[in-house]
Image (spheres, helix red, strand yellow):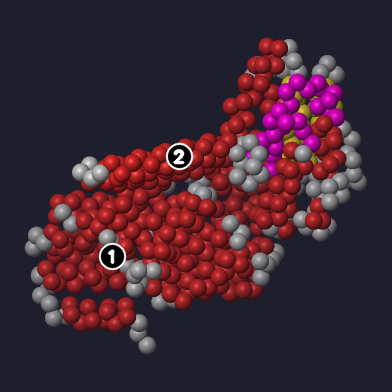
Amino acid sequence: MKNDTQIEIQELEEELQHLSDNSAEYIDARNRLSRLLFRTRPRQAVSLCEQSIEIAKSIDYLPGLATAYGVLSHSQISLSQYAEAREAANKAIQLFVHLDDPEGLLDANNALGISYNTSGEYEKALELFLRNEELARAQGDTEMQGKSLNNVACILLDQGNYSGALEYYIRTFECTRELKQPEMKGTALLNIGVTHLELENLEEALSYLTRSMEYISHVPEIKARALQNLSHYFQKVGDHEQSLLYGEQCLTGYQVINNTHGIIGALSNLGEIHLEQEHLDKAEIYFEQALKICAQKKEKTEQARNHLLLGRVYIRKQQADKAIQTLQKVFALKKNYKTCTYEAHQELSRLFEHKGDYKSALFHHREYVRIKDRLFNQQSEQQIQSLRISFELEQAEREARLLKQKNEELAQNNKKLEQLTRHQKALDTQKSRLVAQLENYAHKDSLTDLFNRRYLDQNFQIELDQALSNDSPLCVMICDIDDFKQVNDRYSHKIGDAVLVEVSRIIAAHIREYDILSRYGGEEFVLLMPGTEETDAIHISQRLNELIEHHDWDTIQPGMKITISIGLCCDTSVSNHEKMLACADQYLYQAKHQGKNQLCYCRQGKGFEQTERKGPGEKQF
């Protein structure tokens, strides 16, 4: 049985057969048909739009021309043709402004915002979506208001601001309650489910993802995305059979509508599921298929990711030379692929260390640390920036509404004016609270609640200058959880996060109030100890090493053992804090190289030393 959309498509196709192909009515009908097709049959929609544009130009029909450019932009987005989509959206915007058509302008702005987001220009996209939401609300356009809120949430989700994303997705769903559009309602439920999945709220995630399928089963693109996230859910809970089933259905869905980006993602995800199960030959096939399409479509981001994943397959197959050759291909894709780049350096460091090529291993380890730290700071900056823009625009909305309210109430009594003043004070209080939250967010690590790299960089040099000025000691310790990647790979990232939190708690519980403990990035932590003599710092470091090793990790994962390697530097004669930290990092590397689960340091005047290992050296999980 045909659904309402299919019936409408058939009626429009029949209507077009009876219209003159050089009339405004013909162009309008084609544009309505294109809008119905751009998600399910995007290539056909592009063809219809391009023909409509030529006809509209030939008869100088500007409304039809503007609409055709707008729908063309949406269709090109469905085909992952983002640069072309932006060009079409800008042409539509110019025409809608000229025609003074607010509804068309909102739709074209929405398409332009999506094109900015997909090309990494998040600030422009976020600002455009928030202003679009304000305009839509003012015009009573609930549908566009919901779309704008949804797109804001998508940006916040991509940047890791999950709580903010969840808030905007819920606001989106509230908008859909007033609409008779199951597709929008299903999309909102799907996105809420995806956010809960990122937050590891697995029961809520499954509930929302399942509910979304009731509304979007007739829209192939959205249905495929829902299937993909159901596959992720079952992968997280360890049900690989269901995960593969949904992953294969997702791949079929994207293949039916020829969605290149979706096909690549589905192939990669299937490969990762097989990699988790040690089905290495199958994983290799899926990653190679994904890479073939990436090369054809010039999808460089996914190409880098799949080279990394394929390299890990060869590592598991103990084909070291082939793994090295594959991982080095990541570096040829230089722009905007920092995550894959630092992970590739990490894998290569381990490979070269295993081969006994310590010079190459050290080079790749340093590149891994450098790029990872830069990415960590960039992500923090990006998240703070998105929150600041969101806050400033929402504050501007409030101030605009207040100004309008003031003008309307000037003729009224003093009671109204007093109410407005109280409201303004409430807004100022809220602003202060949000600014304080932003400042805290800038200095704290969201997972462990320790200080972050930014805070350490801001305060380390201050402490060093003070120590030199007062002729007082200062020591810095850097530690790294041994074989942490194996914890993630074997038990899940959720267990890995729990280990990070517990290690942070143990260290924090055994240091002084004025010591500075920060998460340096990933599984590394830095402890700055002002006023601490070298012998005391060595004792503290050894004590922390023992506390971690002998901690009861069964409460997190039965049978799991966790240890740390530590580098310590107390030499304040170096010129700046960066060299002091680099000194500690060098001894951390020595601790790793000498067998892990130990402290390495340079006793002033006596040269390099290392502590004895405290355990039998068994594998730590």
| Quarter location, residue 70 | bottom left
Per the rendering, the mark at residue 568 is none
Mark 1 Cα-neighbour bin, 10 Å: few <14, some 14–19, many ≥20:
many
What residue span does the magenta drawing correspond to?
510-539
Looking at marks 1 and 2 on the same chain, the residue that comes earlier in the sequence is marked by 1
- Of residues 550 and 170, the one nearer the viewer is 170
Dot 1 corresponds to which residue? 46
Instruction: Look at the picture and state if 169 lies above or below 396.
Output: below
| Residue at figure coordinates x 65%, y 58% from the top left | 313
**Horizontal and vertical percent for residue 298?**
43, 54
Identified by mark 1, the residue type is Val
| Quarter location, residue 509 | top right
* Secondary structure at numbered mark 2: helix
**Horizontal and vertical percent for residue 554?**
82, 56
Dot 2 corresponds to which residue? 429
- Of residues 310 and 378, the one nearer the viewer is 378
Identified by mark 2, the residue type is Thr
